[in-house]
Amino acid sequence: MLSLALFRRASFSAANGIGFCLFASLFGALFLMSQFFQIAQGRTPLQTGAALLVWSAWGFIVAPAAARAAARYGNRPFMLAGLTLQAIGLGSLALTADQHTPYLELVPMLALSGIGSAMVFSTVAGEVMTSVDPDQIGIASGTNNALRELGGVFGVAVLATVFNRPGVYNSPDNFVAGFHSALWVAVAFAVLGVALTGFLKTKKSPVPEVSLEARSAA
């Protein structure tokens, strides 16, 4: 059972809040970005998937690297930097993406957002795990996963509501107008996540010490 007393721990609550905001921003923006490429710019679903790789593929590289670096410098700097990059990338898309924007102009913005979100994936999980006692790690992990998924669903619902308007699918111009408005909501979720990093303690992940006996055995 999840004890509500866990949420009295500032780092636990803040990290879970950051995870919620990250996935609300990411899933909501991704849901509409995939439609933007097809409806506003006329790409096929296969072309859209390939175009989005420049956003999503960073997780394979950046997330493990951020987790290793966080062991030395702490989780907070990477969450702060990652959410800031995500907000900048999505804000830039909201300002510039339209029916005729060349893909190469969108690549830096998509990459910036992808790098930023990847920096937060592993560090949020690490912060949640280190903010509780060892016997509560399973409950903490389940809570974090549930709130991330809830954030994703919430983000899609909120951004779709802001995006929706009469005739939004009737023309690329109408679609882009709703798309821009919704992206600013995704930016707002990322900025809220930035604010929540202020409740995190600046700390490094514990590095296990190797005993003299273990060194001798090695």
Image: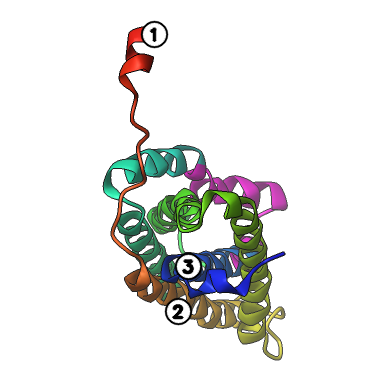
In depth, the one of 24 and 129 nearer the eye is: 129
Local secondary structure at mark 2: helix
Give, as a single range, the part of the protein colored magenta.
32-59
Q: Which residue of the protein is positioned furthest toward the front in this rendering?
A: 213
| Residue beneath the point at 30% across and 54% down | 203
Q: Amino acid at mark 2?
A: Ala
Residue 42 showing in the rendered view:
no
Q: Is disc 2 surrounded by few (<14), some (14 to 19) or many (20+) residues within 10 Å?
A: some
| Residue beneath the point at 40% across and 56% down | 116
Compared to residue 88, the image places residue 215 above or below, namely above
Identify the residue under disc 3. Answer: 18
- Identify the image quadrant of the C terminus: top left
Q: Is residue 117 left or right of residue 179?
A: left
Q: Is disc 1 surrounded by few (<14), some (14 to 19) or many (20+) residues within 10 Å?
A: few
Q: Is disc 3 surrounded by few (<14), some (14 to 19) or many (20+) residues within 10 Å?
A: many
| Residue beneath the point at 44% across and 68% down | 90
In depth, the one of 161 and 77 nearer the eye is: 77
Query: How far across and how far down the image is residue 7, in percent?
Result: 53, 73
Most common SS among magenta residues: helix
Identify the residue under disc 2. Answer: 188
Q: Amino acid at mark 1?
A: Ala
Query: How far across and how far down the image is residue 38, in percent?
Result: 66, 61
> Disc number at residue 217?
1
- Among numbered discs 1 and 2, the one appearing first in the sequence: 2
**CB under 8 Å between callouts 1 and 2?**
no
- Among numbered discs 3 and 1, the one appearing first in the sequence: 3
| Residue beneath the point at 50% across and 44% down | 59
Distance in Å between CA atoms under marks 3 and 1: 43 Å
**CB under 8 Å between callouts 2 and 3?**
no
Compared to residue 167, the image places residue 25 above or below, namely above
